[in-house]
Image (cartoon, rainbow, N blue to C red):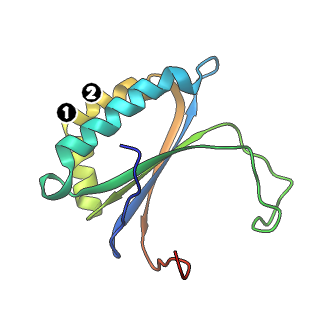
């Protein structure tokens, strides 16, 4: 469940950023996110639906001065759910399914905003000796 993942070249990456409603913290959201991730993994994994792997991140508050054009800018607390799929079509089909909707609605009930953007992989690599 918490092991390393391998992403094949050409995978599609979906980045979903979610902001919590005032008064909601990640401890309250954690179970709903875990259940949603388990549904995706078990129901749409591999040849069943094209899901490859996923990750969940909490914004740490760090904004890179070196990698940002406007490093004085800050961002509100939010979480990122990153998933990798064989295709955008696989992703959309899974997310239109009632099984997913039920799990996702438990997450969105605690969110004030959620945006999911799709990305095509152009490059990947590892450090030498990694």
Vertical position of residue 20 compared to residue 80: above or below:
above
**Visible residue check, residue 104:** no
Residue that sits furthest to the top in the current view: 23
Q: Say which quarter of the image contains residue 101.
A: top left
In percent of width and height, residue 42 lies at 20, 42
Tell me what residue is drawn at x 26 percent, y 45 percent: 41
Assess disc 2: are there few (<14), some (14-19) or many (≥20) residues with their C-alpha within 10 Å of its C-alpha: few
Q: Gap between marks 1 and 2, in whole Å? A: 6 Å
Q: Residue furthest right?
A: 72
Vertical arrangement, residue 115 with respect to residue 102, above or below? below
Residue picked out by circle 1: 98
| Residue 67 appears left or right of 116 | right
Give the labeled residue for mark 2: 102
- Residue 116 percent across, percent down from the top left: 45, 49
At 81% from the left and 51% from the top, the residue drawn is 73
Instruction: Count all numbered tags in the image, as a single digit.
Output: 2
Q: Position of 33 compared to 130: left or right? A: left
- The answer to whether the residue labelled 1 contacts the one labelled 2, judged by CB atoms less than 8 Å apart, is yes
Q: Secondary structure at mark 2?
A: helix
Towards the viewer: 130 or 14: 130
Graded by Cα atoms within 10 Å as few (under 14), some (14 to 19) or many (20 or more), the crowding at tag 1 reads: few
Image position, residue 127 (x, y; %):
56, 78
- Above or below 76: residue 55: below
Asked whether the viewer can see residue 2, the reply is yes
Tell me the SS state at disc 1: helix
Residue, x 51% and y 20% (percent of image)? 28
Return the residue found at the far left.
48
Residue 1, percent across and down? 35, 43
Residue farthest along the bottom direction in this orientation: 128
From the viewer's perspective, tell me whether residue 62 is left or right of residue 5.
Answer: right
Q: Quadrant of residue 86?
A: bottom left
Query: Residue at point 81% right, 68% down?
Result: 66
């Amino acid at each position: 469940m918490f092991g390393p993942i391998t992403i094949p070249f050409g995978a599609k990456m979906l980045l979903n950023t979610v902001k919590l409603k005032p008064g909601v913290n990640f401890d309250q959201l954690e179970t709903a996110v875990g259940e949603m991730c388990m549904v995706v993994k078990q129901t749409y994994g591999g040849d069943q639906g094209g899901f490859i792997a996923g990750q969940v991140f909490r914004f740490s508050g760090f904004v890179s001065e070196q990698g940002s054009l406007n490093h004085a800018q800050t961002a509100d607390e939010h979480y990122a759910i990153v998933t990798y799929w064989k295709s955008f079509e696989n992703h959309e089909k899974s997310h239109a399914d009632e099984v997913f909707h039920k799990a996702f609605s438990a997450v969105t009930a605690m969110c004030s905003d959620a945006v999911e953007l799709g990305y095509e992989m152009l490059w990947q690599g590892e450090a030498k000796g990694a």
